[in-house]
Image (cartoon, rainbow, N blue to C red):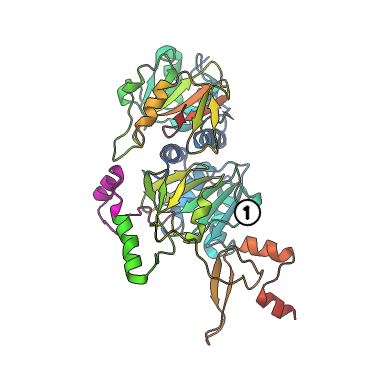
Amino acid sequence: MTDYNFAYLDEQTKRMIRRAILKALAVPGYQVPFASREMPMPYGWGTGGVQVSAAVLTPEDRMKVIDQGADDTTNAVSIRQFFEKTAGVATTTQTAEASVIQTRHRIPETPLTEGQILVYQVPIPEPLRFLEPRETETRKMHALEEYGLMHVRLYEDIARHGHIATSYAYPVRIEGRYVMDPSPIPKFDNPKMEMAAIQLFGAGREQRIYALPPHTKVVSLDFDDHPFEASKPDVPCALCGAVDAYLDEVITDDAGGRMFVCSDTDHCERRRAAGHRGPVAEEDAA
Amino acid sequence: MSALAGGFTDAPVEAARAFRGIMEAMARPGRIEMVAGAVPPAPLSPAAGAVLLTLCDPETPLHLAGETDCSPVRDWVTFHCGAPLVAAEAAAFALGDWAALQPVSRFAIGTPDYPDRSATLIVEMPELLAEGAVLRGPGIADTAALNLPEIEAFQANRRLFPLGFDVLFTSGNRVAALPRSTEVG
């Protein structure tokens, strides 16, 4: 602990990130440029989220880190240990107990409350990037609210597939102004973005921070005749039987066998501890 | 008091706690939070001192308005933050009471490409109360209230959205915020 400054980053870096976070909160959905630092982990492993977490953590916080909903994958475990070591903060896997939650690609199933902070790891913050590769142009498009191209992209989905096939990183409009990439969360999670907690987004390689204050209006883009739908596999979780949680498909053999289980491991564990059983868990018990 | 005294005694931890208060205030307009740890020279409030120590450094041009533009404050800011002291038009942060900061149209409001390149005003208040002007917008579930020094200037600032300045109100060891996104009624 004493080998590092509190939360790893030096104070001037933290001030720079903190100023960016405040501007991001003042203009919800706008991507604030920041001078992203090299972190002791590769790009793509959450360097943006880690820098934002380092700038907001206090010694009193209890931190949770999830990767695709799971607390026990390499990325989640190593970031949790990073902050245990450099900030000395307590950690937890339980959503309700955490004050700061860093996430890669999921919003926890348990509704977040006031006093909690959700930090997203963002790979590509610019929702228009695959439509327009030039930063100078996308910046101008945001300035002019020129978002027609994004609707064209969704329309092309309908023309090709009969429905909007975009299933993750589904674009949202913030307070009727900025179109924002919610990071690659499944579109099932989009409606949860109107929440009581503060949401901060950090993109390390792309050097952008953006934010949503609590209760900010978040609308998933759609059409009158093709309304947004928060879809998920239409089966219960094989382990806990949950029908309202987002599910991962797990291949169980090389003969086409598969099962669907909760992607939120904390949610699934708590349900099983409370006695809920899914189809596979019941077979095992029998 | 010497300009060398009155900073954070444990900067990383105290700045982290102060920032949490400032961020909660900015994320929930009208919410009054505590910030502690700084002992700045008069006439600065401890909260204004903590905001300076938490957010200002050699990268942030600072404008001192009215009574705050005195030699004890200038020396304290120079030693603890190292922020260059500048005219209102060039400031990233501006400090003073509401009257001294007039006209607020002098401050940077950002550009359409970069709305973040706007000033943050640190407004010293006699007191902060959750009553008075009614606030609506991002960060507020229904409505909030705060004793703003006036209403019209903030309504005009809201009309500039996504451009505009953002405001931190300080009094004693308390801080509240009014980002440009808030509708004031």
Q: Is residue A1 left or right of residue A11?
A: right
Question: Does A130 appear in magenta?
Answer: yes
Question: Regarding mark 1 in the picture, which secondary structure is present there?
Answer: helix
Q: Is residue A62 left or right of residue B108?
A: right
The residue segment tinted magenta is: A122-148
State the residue position of label 1: A95
Occupied quadrant, residue A161: bottom left
Q: In this view, does A237 lie to the left or right of A122?
A: right
Image location (x, y in percent) of residue A157: 35, 66
Could you say which is closer to the camera, residue B11 or residue A168? Answer: A168
Indicate the amino acid at tag 1.
Thr
Residue at horizontal 48 percent and vertical 55 percent from the top: A190
Residue at horizontal 62 percent and vertical 55 percent from the top: A110
Image location (x, y in percent) of residue A234: 55, 71
In terms of secondary structure, what is the magenta stretch mainly? Answer: loop
Looking at the image, residue B171 lies above or below residue A188 = above
Residue lying farthest bottom?
A255
Whether residue A129 is visible, yes or no, is: no
Occupied quadrant, residue B175: top right
Which of the chains bears the disc numbered 1? A
Could you say which is closer to the camera, residue A81 or residue B46? Answer: B46
Could you say which is closer to the camera, residue A124 or residue A154? Answer: A154
Image location (x, y in percent) of residue B16: 54, 37
Image location (x, y in percent) of residue B8: 54, 29
Looking at the image, residue B22 lies above or below residue B94 = below
Residue at horizontal 47 percent and vertical 41 percent from the top: A10
